[in-house]
Image: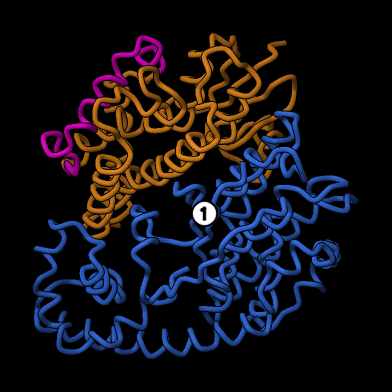
Amino acid sequence: MAAVKLLGVWVSPYNCRVICALKLKGIAYEYIEEDLLNKSPLLLQYNPVHKKIPVLVHDGRPICESAVILRYVDETWPQNPLSPTDPYERAVALFWIKFADDTTSSIAMIYLTTGEEQEKAAKECLEMLETIEEHGLIEGKKFFGGDEINMVDIAFCSVAHWLGVIEEVTGLKPFEPHKLPKLKSWILNFKSVPVIKESLPDIETMLAFFKGRREMVLASKSS
Amino acid sequence: MEGEVVLLDFWPSMFGMRTRIALAEKQIKYEYREEDLRNKSALLLQMNPVHKKIPVLIHNGKPICESLIQVQYIDEVWNDRAPLLPPNPYQRATARFWADFVDKKIYDLGAKVWRTKGEEQEAAKKELIECLKLLEGQLGDNPYFGGKDFGFVDVALVPFYCWFYTYEKFGSFSIEAECPKLIAWAKRCMQKESVAKSLADQEKIYDFVLHLKKALGIEDEVAKETVRAAETAGFFRVVNFMDSAILYIKVKWGILSSSMVRSSCKVIALLEGHAHQRAQEVSKFRL
């Protein structure tokens, strides 16, 4: 009976956040893939309020919401700390994690919508990316965490990995790397970290998945 | 340790109230500055350039944004008194989960209850009660969400208590009838000085919302007319009738990026003549 279990869905960026944190800390865990169209009794038992993944189960007790899970993991396993020790820096980090939540939602909206709604979603996403460039990333700092990645970098995995896939599948490209150089560098740095490379889902599999999803969205809008 | 503490706030904001409560719990002296949301101060725009929203806590000149983050910051810095989060990581995770639940659900549902009518309002009322009942369940037989002591979730939720009167009046229902234990909890919290002096008067909130509804009501009609005219003239197709009025407002107050400005020039040209005055009214009261 594994002490740490993770209920997740391979293609979810929120799930990926937790995998990154667990791997960075070297925590052994049992991964359980959930079928969201047929939610398991275990998921419904562990997350009765939202019925969503990811859910971390530690010694039989569930923790829900990826941002809450990240902090729990960091507080419970102190090796390779993922958040600043200074309270002010930590408050800034939490602000950007919340912003990463909003950014992740806006990226999803791009493939979930069509027509004007989709254009609006792409514009909103671009605005968020511009905000990250202007206010979130600091010139000369390799990661949000400084020289090493921390939970803010992890929280932005959707920007590093999902955005490109969604852009390719929908043909909309809100992100122009030459206009957002700090973000472009951050993405390259983030994806070069060995543990992150291991944790991100395979691109080809993701492309196939999102192409299929996009077809479903288009079919449902035209009917 | 204390240093200089300033709070940029807006009196009816339940988010600002959270921070006021935390500061009061810790007996921190601070300067309260009321913001006029129609005319945001240079300090607010400088300290919260990303969202331009209140509350903003400024400690020794450095800003902390987002109310729950402020409460956690206050708890960590002034950690020698009145702890708001428990020491155990699992209990902390549980507290953060429920505070996040309040954030995700209560504000938007409450806003729908006072802003909408008919089916939309009924659905919002139903869901709001369901959420409050879930919270009631979480409270159980404890005096507070923090257990025997007032804690993080109590701070996150109790400010909504002064808004319940407004929800009830507009929604024609009684929250106490559906969730008696929750109201008993709220009244218990109100016996604490930190809560009583931080929450706004519920009748004043109701008057404020009445005024706001009137302003928005007029706004909606003008926006609708203007947008229909633009559509007929072939300027653009509208997804949402409020889009163009809000687009105009955003451009005027510099929130949109330049690429969006270019594409909306035609819309602005049309609206310039009509909606200038009205546009000001709508943007005012976003909390």
Q: Position of residue A168 (x, y in %)?
A: 19, 34
Q: Position of residue A171 (x, y in %)?
A: 16, 41
Q: Position of residue A107 (x, y in %)?
A: 32, 43
Q: Is residue B252 left or right of residue B94?
A: left
**On-image quarter of the N terminus of chain B:** top right
Dominant secondary structure of the residues highlighted in magenta in the image:
helix
Q: Hey, what amino acid is under mark 1?
A: Leu
Q: Nearer the viewer, residue A151 or B98?
A: A151
Q: Position of residue B42 (x, y in %)?
A: 33, 64
Q: Nearer the viewer, residue B126 or B160?
A: B160
Q: What residue is at 76 percent from the left and 68 percent from the top? A: B196
- The magenta-colored residue range is A172-199
Query: Is B204 rendered above or below residue A28?
Result: below
Colour of chain B, in one word, is blue
Colour of chain A, in one word, is orange
The picture quadrant where one finds residue A180 is top left
Q: Is residue A175 magenta?
A: yes
Query: Is A203 rendered above or below residue A124?
Result: above
Q: Is residue A156 left or right of residue B143?
A: left
Query: Can you name the residue that lies furthest to the right here?
Result: B141
Q: Is residue B13 magenta?
A: no
Q: Is residue A151 left or right of residue A50?
A: left
Q: Is residue B126 left or right of residue B82?
A: left
The picture quadrant where one finds residue B32 is bottom right
Q: Name the residue carrying label 1.
A: B57
Query: Is A15 rendered above or below residue A170?
Result: above
The picture quadrant where one finds residue A222 is bottom left
* Helix, strand or loop under label 1: strand
